[in-house]
Image: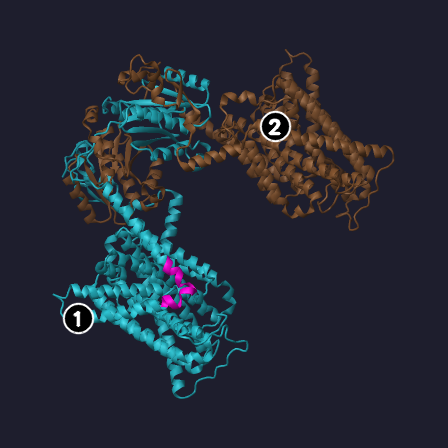
Chain colours: A brown, B cyan
Amino acid sequence: MSERREGSPDLVERRPERGGLPGDRYVRIVRPYKGAFTRRGPGHLVAREEVLAPTTPLGRLVDVARRVLFGARIPTEREIHERIGIFKGLAVFASDNISSSAYATEEIMRVLVLAGVASLTLTMPITIVIVVVLAIVVASYQQTIRAYPNGGGSYIVASDNLGPAAGLTAAGALLTDYVLTVSVSIAAGVAALTSVAPELFDYRVLLGVLFVVMLCVGNLRGIRESATIFSIPTYVYLVAIYGMLAYGLFRAVTGDLPAYEAPADWHPTNAEPLALLLILRAFASGSVALTGTEAVSNGVPAFKPPEWRHAQIVLILMGACFGSIFLGMSLLAGRIGILPDPTEQQTVVSQLTALLVGAGTPYHYLVQVSTALLLVLAANTAFADFPRLSSILAKDGFMPTQFGYRGDRLAFSIGIIALSVLAAGLIVGFGGSVTNLIPLYTIGVFVAFSLSQTGMVRHWWKLRATERGWQVRAAFNGVGAIATAIVAIIVGVAKFALGAWMVLVLIPVLIAIMWGIQQHYRSVRDAMTLERPDTPLPRLSPRVIVPVSRLDRAALYALAFARAIAKDVTAVHIADTAEDADEMQRRWDRWGGGIPLAVVETPYRVLLAPLMAYIDAIDRQDPGRTVVVVLPEFVPRHFWEFFLHNQSALRLKLRLYFRRNTVVVDVPYHVDQAYETEEDPAQISSVSNR
Amino acid sequence: MSERREGSPDLVERRPERGGLPGDRYVRIVRPYKGAFTRRGPGHLVAREEVLAPTTPLGRLVDVARRVLFGARIPTEREIHERIGIFKGLAVFASDNISSSAYATEEIMRVLVLAGVASLTLTMPITIVIVVVLAIVVASYQQTIRAYPNGGGSYIVASDNLGPAAGLTAAGALLTDYVLTVSVSIAAGVAALTSVAPELFDYRVLLGVLFVVMLCVGNLRGIRESATIFSIPTYVYLVAIYGMLAYGLFRAVTGDLPAYEAPADWHPTNAEPLALLLILRAFASGSVALTGTEAVSNGVPAFKPPEWRHAQIVLILMGACFGSIFLGMSLLAGRIGILPDPTEQQTVVSQLTALLVGAGTPYHYLVQVSTALLLVLAANTAFADFPRLSSILAKDGFMPTQFGYRGDRLAFSIGIIALSVLAAGLIVGFGGSVTNLIPLYTIGVFVAFSLSQTGMVRHWWKLRATERGWQVRAAFNGVGAIATAIVAIIVGVAKFALGAWMVLVLIPVLIAIMWGIQQHYRSVRDAMTLERPDTPLPRLSPRVIVPVSRLDRAALYALAFARAIAKDVTAVHIADTAEDADEMQRRWDRWGGGIPLAVVETPYRVLLAPLMAYIDAIDRQDPGRTVVVVLPEFVPRHFWEFFLHNQSALRLKLRLYFRRNTVVVDVPYHVDQAYETEEDPAQISSVSNR
């Protein structure tokens, strides 16, 4: 321990010297803290929750509201208990991916139908190709989870193996995509709702924003609660949709499929030839289905131990569920010959269910409502991932440190709020339409996928000496990297004019910003770090300036403080007129407090500029010494009374903040502060005369 | 002079001791100021305009914009040159009153016509009664001007002679009225414009607000320029309107008056019986004509010497001009039998001019445009009076001190801005309609008139021993007081339900607020004033706490400062986890700077509350001593970089500001600040080892 001097921080051990009760250990240890701290060692205290208790009535009200909305505070040590198992893990991490099945088929059909109804026969082949890509991605990510048990998001894998440029590219792509996941999922969820409740269609933007706010609050409560909330809709959806598909397949096998009649006013919006580009666009739209695959490998540490094992199982279950639903949906829609509703008021899933079990039946409502809930909650995956990735980036210095702070409930509050604001903005900006948002989506996912898989290939190559069977693993990842790179290029080309260009512009901008932030943090750290761990303290010789507007108690208290901290004290008075200047000079002489006064007359009635000029002049006279400006500040009893007092002190502080080698001291004088008590002889004796 | 110690402020005299060139007086005197100050005596400097020069490019841009908009700065000493004579005085102070002639006749007719066209014959008698009241008021105010050559506004006269309650009542009434003067005059000016340009009628609210902004900018430029601007329209209006009236009277005498045809769709909006109340309401509406009479006596000091003489002449000229125009207007309107336009699109003056000289002729435009300009500029009277009255109230402690500060151009900037905001708000709130605003107007004026004249009676009574002919003077003022009191009661009763109640509620509220503000200032002054002019400085014994988040250069600089100002220094580190706590403890020991460290662990990741609790604990241990919190602050190179650093220091400062006996010291460390230079041996030698 360092040398102990007067003013040692370890209050506990010091107590007896100052008249405590020797022998009465209990009193000696606890008294000074009054329940505020627990003592862990010499000079090491642990704050108790009591110190957080608000002291004002308004503060208590805010605190109660926070606890109701977000729940009780969670100490950092309890973090381990927040982990989840396979059952909840599937709900939390797979809901994003599985929920894509609610719109993936439809988005393929919407593109194909542009070339006429006949081209819809291509829906099923395209679905099969996408499911094959999904299988490749799942297999590829099995390797990642095993290799990165602490969370192998694309950012980590890419920067670990391919360097920071690749990592930042993946990060920029993913951040963009997480925001879009929230917007698209919620817009699709609202679409599922308005399919059975068309009267809500006009409010779809408002509904979307409301769902974002709900998710934001839910996530600020922390992980565990959200897992519980999210389990139910996922499993209800799975049961409802499998039931519907099974019934439909049974009727297909028995040749009993219902007949579909296109709406009377239906006609293709824009008859295009069935060119290769159109097929590629359909494929690109459908590959939205693969978004969310990343979530599991990203969140490995959130699982109960053994984390990697649970994560792998969840990933396989997810792929199986999604693939089977997607295939079933495309098959049935194709066999019945459903056409996508051009007004976006009826989803394909809703039409399919209505045809099979009857429109407006309870089962139709069950499918639609559970779809809506699942989609809205699927956005939750992004609410888990965006803040987590942001916090990792913040730790690496690529994002502002605030993204790395955890709130009362261990959640990364700033990341959650930033995501909510951005996603709600997109929903408003694109009028809540899924089809308008889709072109922006998916490109980021596939860029990140491809970088991550390429990184994994490099990873196995580096471990080739120690890891047996590295060639097989590298091959899996290599196939994944190539497949996802191809998809990324297809999506970029096919959707470029429709909106993908925005993302292709945004990602480099994000990379540049993150790079700039890191440069800033690095330059600051370099400038601030001590050259040696035992750098001696510099010796400062401060000279003190006390701006005085009136010779009152506040001024005297500030002057007293100034004299207590330094020998070299000067008071400055800024006078509006020559008479004012003379009057102040006279009063000062009559006061005779032994501190020199400079009076500066300001013919233009401006306060700050002459004061700053005076400080500059003082400084030029004897440069290098620290200038200390001691400000007498008057503290009124009530907050509103501030407006009755001149706020020039605030402006002065702002100006001085940017002045080099300048220290600002606020000496607040409370209006009802006792003045005479400080002349208490007992205290005077304890003060060295400076 | 007080004892001179090290650090004397009189840089000039100190220079030679520190190695200046003896004998070279020029260098010795000027060098340290570099053109920033002129020396007026020992310890008395005068700042030059150069110190106001902005130093940043943005600052220079703002400065140029200010100079273009508001003109060059004016030093306080040049104030005397801003005075005005009779010619400009009539334009500045009488424009409000004279401009009332543009709507006074019309507002009488609008009320009378409610009882049918026949009752319009009462217009002329009511006009004559009002002109008589005007004559009484003018005669009465002649006394006031003579007795109060330094400005005898109602507030000053009433509080001088009847006590502060009467003074505040007059002040509240006048402030309300000045705001209404601006709103009504500008609304009427816009109405004059839209009479000849009906396509602007839909934009009347916007036009009104634009005119308010123009006046605001004009007045921020200061008095002289406004007098020049305002002279032209006043005299153009007088020439144009007298020309029109003379022509009309000539045609009336020769029996050649044009015939008037009521519009085809015209019918009385609401046929009421011609009861006494209606006649009183007509009188109340017309007595709006007396507003603005107060202006001259209020502004006596703005005239060139002999101020009172010039003011008296201006007041008489004003009464003569207004009375003759008002009588002529009512006479001609009655003889021709004009009806007021119920849609408010054509003013009576416009109809009259159109009938006499032809609608759309250049002379019609001349009358309307000069009326509009005069009305808009008449609002300028309130722009002179409201800020002046506010500044007097501020000096007496009834309004926030900010209202007493003069800007670059000697104008009371805050008062001008406050008036503009309130008046623009009223124009928007009442849809720009003169007739809607009129009922709120005038009551305040007459309350103030009556209080002021009563005060004058009291004034002469007090001077009865020395002042010859005091009885005559008191009689004049007594008649004025009674006449205006009767008008005030008539206006209050007749217009109560139409809006006067708002003013009758507002005035007491204003009085209560002003009273409360004065109580606050008084209690603060009482609490702050020294009991003896030579009260000794209290002796303080500060103990210093330095919150340290990392052991870096910023922290070391703050610790160095702390050690330079006190012996009793403790560093505190708030740690998120136990590991963090141990790590900090280890680094601290390795650093070995001789300052004790307390580590406080915060399991809920909250920073401020444990720190505050620690300070409280320190304080309880040894109460009464000043706690000094020294904050290491990091200053980045660019402003935007602030957002990349945690703002908790700001929140801590806010919390500590309200803590008693606590001083906050900001030690800013600039990112590119040289660190090692402070170990310069020359400087170390100059520092006492504390």
Amino acid of disc 1: Gln
State the predominant SS element of the stretch in magenta: helix
Residue A647, compared with residue A142, is above or below; it is below
Q: Quadrant of residue A625?
A: top left
Query: Which residue in the structure is indicated by mark 2?
Result: A227
Quarter of the C terminus of chain B within the rendering: top left
Image vertical order of residue B535 relative to residue B587, above or below: below
Is residue B467 one of those drawn in magenta?
Answer: no
Quarter holding the N terminus of chain B?
top left
Query: Which secondary structure lies at badge 2?
Result: helix
Chain of the residue on which disc 1 is drawn: B
Range drawn in magenta: B491-505
Left or right, B413 with reference to A143: left
Residue at x-position 27% and y-position 69%: B482
Q: Residue at x 31, y 41 (%)?
A: A636
User: Quadrant of residue A192 in the image?
Assistant: top right
- Residue B495 appears in which quarter of the rendering? bottom left
Front residue of B133 and A274: B133
Tag 2: Cα neighbours inside 10 Å, few (<14), some, or many (≥20)?
many
Residue located farthest toward the right when viewing the structure as drawn: A255
Q: Are dots 1 and 2 on a single chain?
A: no
Q: Residues within 10 Å of mark 1 (few under 14, many from 20)?
A: some
How far from the left and from the top, in percent, is residue B485? Answer: 30, 67
Label 1: which residue?
Answer: B471
Report the residue at 66% width, 30% height from top. A232
- Residue A566 higher or lower than A361, as above or below: above
Tell me: B555 left or right of B138. right
* Residue B496, x across and y down, in percent: 40, 65
Asked if B534 appears above or below A48 in the picture, the reply is: below
Q: CA distance from mark 1 to mark 2?
A: 93 Å
- Under mark 2, the amino acid is Ala
